[in-house]
Image (cartoon, rainbow, N blue to C red):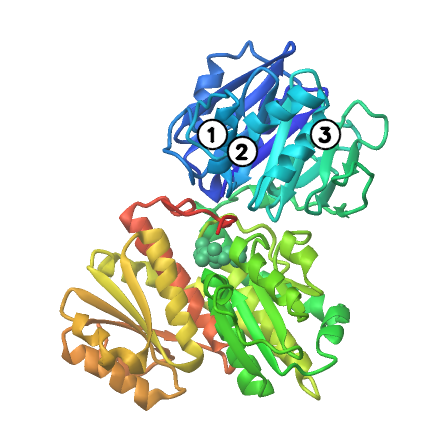
Amino acid sequence: MCGIVGYSGKSDAVSPVLEGLSRLEYRGYDSAGISMNIDGKLCIFKKEGKLDNLKNFLKEKSELSSTIGIGHTRWATHGKVNDTNAHPHGNEDFSIVHNGIIENANVLREELKQKGYQFKSETDSETFLVKLSDEFKQSKDIEQAIIDTFKSIEGNSAFVVIAKNSHKIYSIKRSAPLVCGVNEESGDVYVSSDPYALIGFTTKIYFPGDSVLCIADHRKANNHYSFLDLNRNETKDYTIQQKQMSLNTVSKGKYEHFMLKEIFEQPELVNKLFSIYSEDITSLNEMTKSRPEMVHIIACGTALHAGLVIKDFLERKNRIRVNSDFASEFRYKEPLICKKDVGLFISQSGETADTLACQELCVAQDLKTYSIVNVEGSTLYRSCDYNLLLHAGAEIGVASTKAFTQMALVGYILSNAYLDEPKDLKSEFELLSQAITLILNREEEIKKIARDIYNYKGFIFTGRREQYPIALEGALKLKEIAYVHAEGYAAGELKHGPIALFDESMVNIAIVTKDLYEKTLSNAQEVKARKGVMVILGEGEDSELSEISDFYFGIDYLGLTDLKPLVTNVVLQLLSYHIAKFKGTDIDKPRNLAKSVTVE
Ligand code: AGP
């Protein structure tokens, strides 16, 4: 959601802060701003709309420079999208940026108004600023004032603060993403809501725990950071990451969009995942030591769809009972949990608020919690007993593609490890990588189909059993980047309602593999009989399917069985991508969406 970047060091702050903010554009935002300490005065510049608006505005003020600055991209929760509500918020003494929601903002605002304070914006974030000033007025101690203010607010948030008479950057968070970085050569210090913003700037990154006040001081000789608990004692509640993501992840390379680049990375990532997990199985061994009564697979969006693929593996191959649910539902259901169950949380970012809340709920009920997660050091990663990493590199496109494939594959590795005699997965992974490459080589064919269907009114994706989650995922991808109405259904469900939607303006993207072939074929025939436009993804050449299709795409699964859904999914990723391209949408940053949903 909101993006945060801060810098303090020997050079000008504007350039690293704006560069960091540009990298956070993929998270979605509606306005951006920066605050700098210029000759002892805190100055704030903020603009509604794209980051370019702020950049152009700052170009005209090129004489302004400062060695300390904090920047923010806002995804509005409280208050309209305008310059005033944009961050940073500030007054003479402090500038602050915030990501999250202050749940008791109204109460605090009223209390502060009673004390005579006035508010400029409609945001919840400004209550933190005003409360901070009030606390500082009494204690005259910046650190204590931040701690006391932080204690008074409810909800999950991260805050970064700079002060008039200080060259330090202060940050603190509760269940919201925050990283602190340092470049050990120059001594420059950085903070951000996402390590991705700091690639190439820092050599060491700290992931602080909740309620830790992080104080970054570039003037200190060695230890540029102090970490204090709420009693102001030094704490070691943080993890350190020294290895850096490659700068390569920041660029689109030869591709027009990050989404396309990420789709094309998949064959290589599949092979890489196999080598990593064949060398290091420590976590897997620990996780599969005993058989759980039930696995609760909890996630959101695409991650949950990958979870449904994993559910199928665990149920069919391991005969383990699985409950899968949206994180936003599970947490409010008083779920039936028993101590021998396991919570399996799946997330690309590791920062999705609802998923994190469910993990906490399971811990409170004494469950072991495992994650399948991409971002090492993320809140989810830090909170679970064991983690299985995706090793997918940064995923920048808002529409998740490579993370889905890696999530499902990690789940497959987990399911294999639960077997009494685990299989050697080498050849299966190699075949999967090759089968995905074959699909990528047919991009032009998929693009042609996209050109012919992109203007239709609606799209129903269908599949059965292990291909059903792919129908859901295909529809989600199309909705989010092409802004068209799309739904995924289990093919057998069509005649229980959705078939009423079909006429010549509605497309059925039907996955018909050799598994349950006859049944799925009749579902497709039923739609055809109602004049639906048929795009069929079948297996190899198939005259029967070709005959009833308006567009037929035969997939060569190269003899794969369990991993077939992951191949089908790549066809749908490319199809959505090209439909969106024909529609001319903002593919990497679709409207209204944020890459990681850190508010509930
Ligand atoms: C998928 O394309 C999404 N943009 C979205 O559904 C995403 O998968 C979901 O928000 C969960 O995110 P996470 O994996 O970072 O937890």
Q: Disc 3 marks which amino acid?
A: Gln
The kind of residue tagged 1 is Ala
Q: Nearer the viewer, mark 1 or mark 2?
A: 1
Specify the quadrant of the image occupied by residue 78: top left
- Judging by the rendered image, the residue that carries numbered circle 3 is 144
Earlier sequence position, callout 1 versus callout 2:
2
Residue occupied by mark 1: 32
Q: Position of residue 130 (x, y in %)?
A: 55, 25
- State how far apart marks 3 and 1 are (Cα): 29 Å
112 versus 311 height, above or below: above
Q: Nearer the viewer, residue 331 or 544?
A: 331
Residue depicted at 46% across the width and 77% down the height: 557
Contact, mark 3 vs mark 2 (Cβ under 8 Å): no
Q: Within 10 angstroms of label 2, few (less than 14), some, or many (20 or more) residues?
A: many
Find the residue positioned furthest to the right. Answer: 221
Amino acid type indicated by mark 2: Leu
**Is 340 left or right of 596, judged from the image as shown?**
right
Residue 495 is marked as none
Q: CA distance from mark 1 to mark 2?
A: 8 Å
Q: Is residue 446 left or right of residue 377?
A: left
Which residue does the image show at 52% across and 77% down from the upper left?
Answer: 323
Q: Residue at x 62, y 83 (%)?
A: 293
- Does residue 198 appear in this view? no
Residue tagged 2 = 21
Label 1 secondary element: strand
> At 58% across and 28% down in the image, what residue appears?
131
